[in-house]
Image (tube, grey):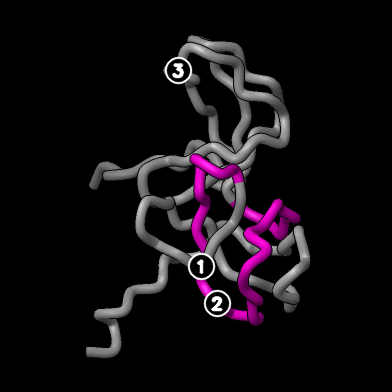
Amino acid sequence: MARQAMPVQTGKVIDYINSGETKINVGDVVPLISLCGIAETDIEAGASGAVALYGVWEFPAETSVAFEVGEAVYWDAANNHVTKTAAGGVFLGIVVAPKAVSAALARCKIGVAAVSSSASE
C-alpha cells in the first residue's frame, strides 16, 4: 500500500512566502488566518523565509487588562499588541506568565490549538 502522506518538516518552523508589498522583519508577528507565527528571518515582499509556529515568546501587550496563565490571547495587528479580545484579532496562543494590568509585555506560548468557547457546550 502506498503512503498517503510524506513528512516534509517538523512544523516548528515553516517556509512562508510574503505575499504582501512590504518586508517582514525578523521578530515580526505573522498572522496566518487562524494562528500566528514569528518571522525568524527578514522576508522581502515576494520572497520566502522562515516563520516559527512554536515556542514561548515575549510580545508587546495591551496595558488596560491583566493576563492570567492559561488564558487565550490574540494578535491585534492594528495596534501591534497582544489582547484578550478575539474580535478583529488572530489567535496567538496561551499566556504562560502572569501580566499585571500596567505591564507592557506578555509571555505567550504559540503553537497551541485555539480555545473554542463552544467546546464546553
Separation of disc 3 and disc 2 at Cα? 31 Å
- Residue with the mark numbered 3: 20
Query: Pointer 1: residues within 10 angstroms few (<14), some, or many (20+)?
Result: many
Residue 3 in percent (x, y) is at 30, 44
Give the amino acid at mark 2: Glu
In the rendered structure, which disc, 2 or 1, sits on the residue that comes first in sequence?
2
* Residue drawn at the location 45% of the way across and 51% of the way down: 35
Q: Position of residue 80 (x, y in %)?
A: 59, 43
Q: In whole angstroms, how far apart are the C-alphas of marks 3 and 1?
A: 26 Å
Q: Is residue 74 left or right of residue 58?
A: left
Say which element carries label 2. Answer: loop
Q: Which one is closest to the eye, mark 2 or mark 1?
A: 1
Examine the structure image and report whether residue 27 is included in the region drawn in magenta.
no
**What's drawn in magenta, residue-wise?**
54-80
Q: Nearer the viewer, residue 107 or 89?
A: 89
Percent of width and height locating residue 81: 61, 50
Kind of residue sitting beneath label 1? Lys
Residue designated by label 2? 71
Q: What's the amino acid at mark 3? A: Gly
Instruction: Specify whether 69 is left or right of 14.
Output: right
In the rendered structure, are the residues bearing label 2 and label 1 in contact, judged by CB atoms less than 8 Å apart? yes
Q: Is residue 89 above or below residue 94?
A: above
Task: Give the label on residue 66, or none.
Answer: none
Of residues 11 and 87, the one nearer the viewer is 87
Position of residue 56 relative to residue 35, above or below, is: below
Side (left or right) of 107 relative to 35? right
Q: Residues within 10 Å of mark 3 (few under 14, many from 20)?
A: few
Q: Residues within 10 Å of mark 2 (few under 14, many from 20)?
A: some
Identify the mark nearer the N-term, 3 or 2. Answer: 3
Which quadrant of the figure contains the C terminus? Answer: bottom left
Disc nearer the start of the sequence (3/1): 3
Q: Which residue is mark 1?
A: 84
